[in-house]
Image (cartoon, rainbow, N blue to C red):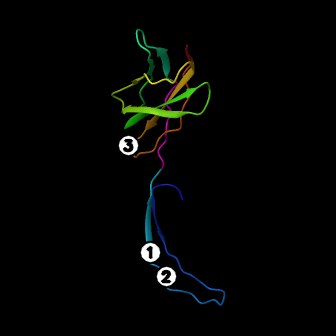
Amino acid sequence: ITGDAFHRYTLQAIDSAGNASAECIPLNVHTHTRLKRDRVEAPTANMKAGTHGIAVTWHGMAHPVTRYVIYRSKNDAQWFSIGSVNGNATLSFTDDRMTGAGSYRYSVGAVYPDGMEAPLGASSAPVNVQ
């Protein structure tokens, strides 16, 4: 199933003797053309002067974005969502909830108006916290 189209599905049961049931009520489905989901370019992450936070910044998307989701990995372990900000109006986030010393990387995902999130793009260079 591809493209912007309407499809109609019905179901009918047939037993081993060949007896068929009546068809069920049809299910009508509208499929939409899948939009291209651009990845956010690698963000920049730096220790924020005078605080214990890491400032993460990135470039906006060419397409409308509902929100950005910020992900963090500590010591190259699993990625976790640590927050989100509204669409193209906000292109920065401060992570002030690091969990001790380590090497932190960040990546940003874009959520489009239809609710779908683009795959994560490249990560930031590591920020080492002592």
Dot 2 and dot 1 residues touching (CB under 8 Å): yes
Q: To which residue does mark 3 refer? A: 113
Residue under the point 52% across and 76% down: 11
Label 1 Cα neighbours within 10 Å, binned few <14 / some 14-19 / many ≥20: few
As drawn, 126 above or below 86: above
The secondary structure type at the circle numbered 1 is loop
* Residue 78: image location, x then y, percent: 59, 33
Q: Amino acid at mark 1?
A: Pro
Q: 42 or 128, which lies in front?
A: 128
Query: Dividing the image into 4 quarters, which one contains the C terminus?
Result: top right
Whole-Å distance between the Cαs marked 1 and 3?
30 Å
Q: Which residues are magenta?
A: 34-42
Q: To which residue does mark 1 refer? A: 26
* Residue 64 in view: no
Residue under the point 45% across and 54% down: 32
Is 41 within the magenta?
yes
Q: 58 or 95, which lies in front?
A: 95
Q: Which image quadrant is residue 5 in?
A: bottom left
Residue under the point 54% across and 80% down: 12
Q: To which residue does mark 2 refer? A: 23
- The reply, left or right, for residue 14 in relation to residue 52 is right
Q: Amino acid at mark 2?
A: Glu
